[in-house]
Amino acid sequence: MKSSNLSIRILFLAFLTAALLFRFVFGLYCPSVTADDDYTQTYVIGLKCFTTHTWPYFGPDVVAPETQFHTQMPGALEGLLGALPFWFSASPESPYLFLNLLSFLGLCLLAWYACKRLPRLSPWFVFTWVLLAPWATHYSTQVINPSYAFLGSVLFFLGFMETIPALRIAAISRTWANLLMGFGLCWVMQLHMSWLAFVPFLLFSIYSQIKEGQWKNALGFTLLGSLPLLALLIPTFAVYGFSTGKDVHGFATGFNWNNAKDIFGTLARYLSIASFEMPRFIGEHTNERIQYLLTSPLLAVPGFLLWLSGYIQPALMIGFWFVPEIPLRRWKPMKWLGLGAFLLLYGCFLFSPDMAASFRIVLFYPVIMLYSLYVYDYLAINPIWHKIGLAFILCVVLFQAGYTMKNIQTNNSIYARQKNQMAQAIDQKNFALLSPRRPDSLY
């Protein structure tokens, strides 16, 4: 029995190693989801820190498309995360590898936690799906600020759920949960604007703990967890003050009727984060997407099946919201958490000039992914769904492998097109050889 358990652990470790290496290659050759310059500038922020030996006072550039309002998020975290791997290996690939180690750690923690909550689900299914879902691969393997933020998002939401009585399963102690919540929030705070939507969750957690008489633990350890990352903000505020004229209020507008009317579109994009939403990543139009699949025998069958599943999965998530409480599964609080997160995001975008696009809300991946896994756990009662789940995972692996091979052949990624410039900039210690920083950048 012990020998069998050891063999399974070794096999699982080999699987995780292969998954990490795959995600690393995927990130190198995956085409960009948003503007190419966003990826280049993220890389350059870390490269500038390394080549000039300067302190990165500001991190991600943030531009509002509707108003062209431009700012940078305060704090040194992104610059340090981008520069650190160069000190170990001055190669174009090192930031990609380091980023993938961070996001892989976060997603593995999420999968581990999901298995603790839902022991009926196969760990092989959970880990494979969490690591290879389209939004997790396209937005946690490439060098861009939301990818770095994935780790903080997972830490925050795991900590949050373990501090709420109705959601807690005691997988993490309350002390560690508060530490993770504080650390995760301040991590995301320096990397992605969606941290503002995390704050209501934090306040609700503290309120719930105060009601339990745990106010010292809630306030003390949440603050303690946030201190290391808050320290990275001190130099920025010391040099630039607390207002640069380019602060977050520039992204707030009056009531946006277009976003208000787009409630079902917002819901679809929210649910798609935990679905196999593949078409948008392979072409702009239906004909182009069909042609993409038909040109590769390896992609055609799994591709069309997964395309269909990308519609079925959101429908299941909506339909199963109306399923009553599942004994011992804490389904009811989880479904209210899923709905509450959606309503909060919808409310935030009512006063934003930007549409609630998936890439702007992708850091809620831990919430919606856990919610979707509850649906699959419920379905797993019937053995037929085990076979469907196995077929689905095989299609996911085949498609993602074929997709990556095709990307390697086309050389259409930021890395493939710019690796020579990256290498030259690193060798000559001149980040501008890759790209100058944007005009009026604060760092």
Image: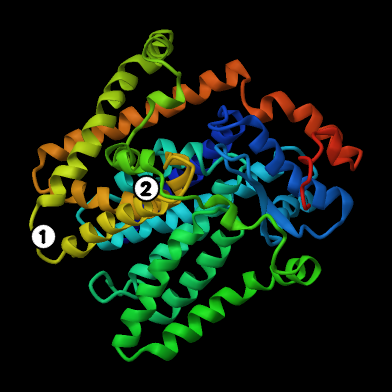
Query: Percent position (x, y) of residue 64?
Result: 58, 42
Question: Of marks 2 and 1, which one's residue comes earlier in the chain?
Answer: 2
As drawn, 146 above or below 306: below
The answer for how far apart the CA atoms under marks 2 and 1 are is 23 Å
Q: Amino acid at mark 1?
A: Ile
Q: Amino acid at mark 2?
A: Phe
In which quadrant is the N terminus drawn? bottom left
Query: Percent position (x, y) of residue 431?
Result: 84, 40
| Left or right side of 213 for 191 | right
Query: Percent position (x, y) of residue 380?
Result: 15, 46
Nearer the viewer's eye, disc 2 or disc 1?
1
* Residue 200 in view: yes
As drawn, 236 above or below 124: below
Q: Residues within 10 Å of mark 2 (few under 14, many from 20)?
A: many
Instruction: Write down the residue under mark 2.
Output: 127
- Kindly identify the residue that appears in the image at 55 percent across and 50 percent down: 251
| Left or right side of 393 for 37 | right
Mark number, residue 326: 1
